[in-house]
C-alpha cells in the first residue's frame, strides 16, 4: 500500500513537512484489508482506490498485522515498524 501525507494528500494536517500527522492517505493496497475498508472511497474496488484520512495509529496496526514494512518510509505519526530478521530476537 502507499501511505502519503503532504499538502495535496487526504491527511491531517494537510501540509507538507508536518512534525506529526494524525491521519494519512492510504492508496492501492495489494490485497483487501478489513481494517481499512471503512475509509475506502470505493469499497467495491478495495485494491484500486484511495483511503482518505486514515488515522495514523490504524495504519501502524495494518503494518504490524502484515509483518512490518518491507521498504520505504511512512509519514511522521505512523510507526515505522520493520519485520524482525531471523536471529535478531
Image: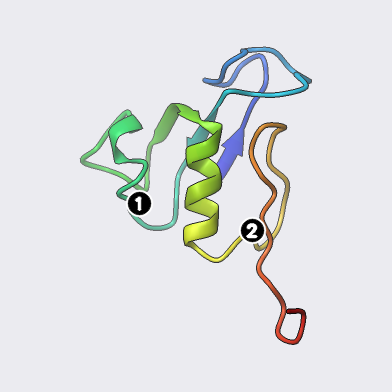
Q: Can residue 1 be seen in this view?
A: no
Q: Is residue 18 above or below residue 79?
A: above
Q: Name the residue under label 2.
A: 69
Res. 76 mark: none
Q: Quadrant of residue 56?
A: top right
The foreground one among 30 and 79 is 79
Residue 14 in the image: state x and y as whole percent. 62, 12
**Residue at horizontal 34%, vertical 31%?**
39
- Residue 89: in sight, yes or no? yes
Gap between marks 1 and 2 measured at Cα: 15 Å
Residue located at (36% from left, 41% from top): 36
How packed mark 1 is, by other alpha carbons closer than 10 Å (few <14, some 14-19, many 20 or more), is few
Residue sitting farthest toward the left: 44
Direction from residue 9 to residue 45 in the image, left or right: left
Residue 18: horizontal and vertical position, in percent?
A: 75, 18
Label 2: element kind: loop
Q: Position of residue 47 (x, y in %)?
A: 36, 48
The secondary element bearing badge 1 is classed as loop
Colour basis: rainbow
Q: Residue 65 or 40: which is nearer the viewer?
A: 65
Q: Earlier in the sequence, mark 1 or mark 2?
A: 1
Which corner quadrant of the image does residue 11 belong to?
A: top right
Q: x, y percentage for residue 70?
A: 65, 63
| Residue in the picture at 78% in, 22% down | 19
Q: Residue at x 27, y 43 (%)?
A: 45
Determine whether, in the image, residue 74 is placed left or right of residue 57: right
Position above or below: 58 against 13: below
Q: Which mark is residue 33?
A: 1
**Location of the C terminus (image quadrant):** bottom right
Amino acid at each position: 500500500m502507499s501511505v502519503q501525507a503532504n499538502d495535496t494528500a487526504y491527511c491531517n494536517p494537510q501540509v507538507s513537512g508536518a512534525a506529526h500527522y494524525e491521519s494519512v492517505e492510504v492508496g492501492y493496497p495489494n490485497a483487501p484489508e478489513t481494517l481499512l475498508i471503512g475509509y475506502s472511497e470505493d469499497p467495491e474496488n478495495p485494491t484500486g482506490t484511495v483511503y482518505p484520512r486514515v488515522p495514523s495509529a490504524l495504519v501502524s496496526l495494518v503494518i504490524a498485522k502484515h509483518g512490518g514494512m518491507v521498504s520505504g518510509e511512512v509519514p511522521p505519526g505512523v510507526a515505522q515498524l520493520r519485520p524482525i530478521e531471523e536471529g535478531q530476537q
